[in-house]
Image (spheres, rainbow, N blue to C red):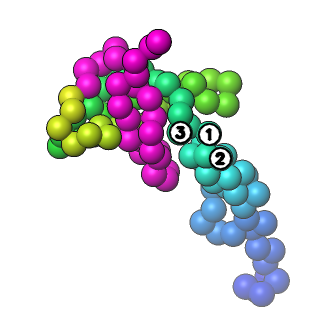
């Protein structure tokens, strides 16, 4: 069998998953950004100046982790604190401030 007669793999030689599945994943990540601004999350990794913190937020029926930076550059937010997402940058970075429950 010559090189030209061989059948090509349906997803290409280097791909691990079908292209449609990849686009679904990318679309899902894009949709997250639209819906997280204004949501309340909980700090799981210290947020502060010069640090990349972590928050957990309820989205799409579950909880997801996002990188977090303080909205005010001098603010430090400790783990366990509730925060409000005030800005979001793709793919998974949120800018947060303390959430004051009323």
Residue 72, image x, y percentages: 26, 40
- Residue found 27% across the figure and 31% down from its top: 47
Q: Is residue 25 visible from the viewing direction of this image? A: no
- Residues drawn in magenta: 77-102
Q: Is residue 30 left or right of residue 56?
A: right
Q: CA distance from mark 1 to mark 2?
A: 7 Å
Q: Nearer the viewer, residue 36 or 101?
A: 101
Estimate how packed mark 3 is, as few (under 14), some (14 to 19) or many (20 or more) residues with alpha carbons within 10 Å.
some
Q: Nearer the viewer, residue 65 or 50?
A: 50
- Residue found 68% across the figure and 52% down from its top: 27
Secondary element at image label 1: helix
Residue 26, image x, y percentages: 63, 53
Q: Is residue 57 left or right of residue 20?
A: left
User: Which disc is residue 31 wearing?
Assistant: 2
Residue 29, image x, y percentages: 60, 47
Name the N-terminal-most of marks 2 and 3.
Answer: 2
Foreground tag (1 vs 2): 1
Whether residues under marks 1 and 2 lie with C-beta atoms below 8 angstroms apart, the answer is yes
Q: Examine the rendered structure and indicate whether residue 67 appears above or below residue 64.
A: below
Which residue in the protein does label 3 denote?
Answer: 37
Secondary element at image label 3: loop
Q: Nearer the viewer, residue 36 or 23?
A: 36
Q: CA distance from mark 2 to mark 3?
A: 12 Å
Whether residues under marks 1 and 3 lie with C-beta atoms below 8 angstroms apart, the answer is yes
Find residue 43 and report its image quarter: top left
Q: Is residue 59 visible from the viewing direction of this image? A: yes
Q: Examine the rendered structure and indicate whether residue 57 appears above or below residue 25.
A: above
Q: Is residue 36 left or right of residue 60?
A: left
Which residue in the protein does label 1 denote?
Answer: 35
């Amino acid at each position: 069998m010559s090189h030209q007669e061989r059948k090509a793999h349906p997803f290409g030689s280097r791909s691990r998953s079908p292209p449609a599945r990849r686009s679904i994943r990318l679309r899902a990540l894009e949709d997250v950004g639209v819906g997280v601004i204004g949501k309340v999350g909980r700090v799981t990794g210290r947020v502060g100046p010069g640090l990349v913190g972590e928050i957990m937020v309820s989205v799409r029926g579950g909880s997801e982790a996002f990188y977090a930076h303080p909205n005010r550059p001098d603010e430090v937010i400790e783990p366990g604190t509730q925060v409000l997402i005030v800005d979001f940058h793709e793919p998974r970075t949120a800018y947060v401030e303390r959430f004051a429950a009323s």
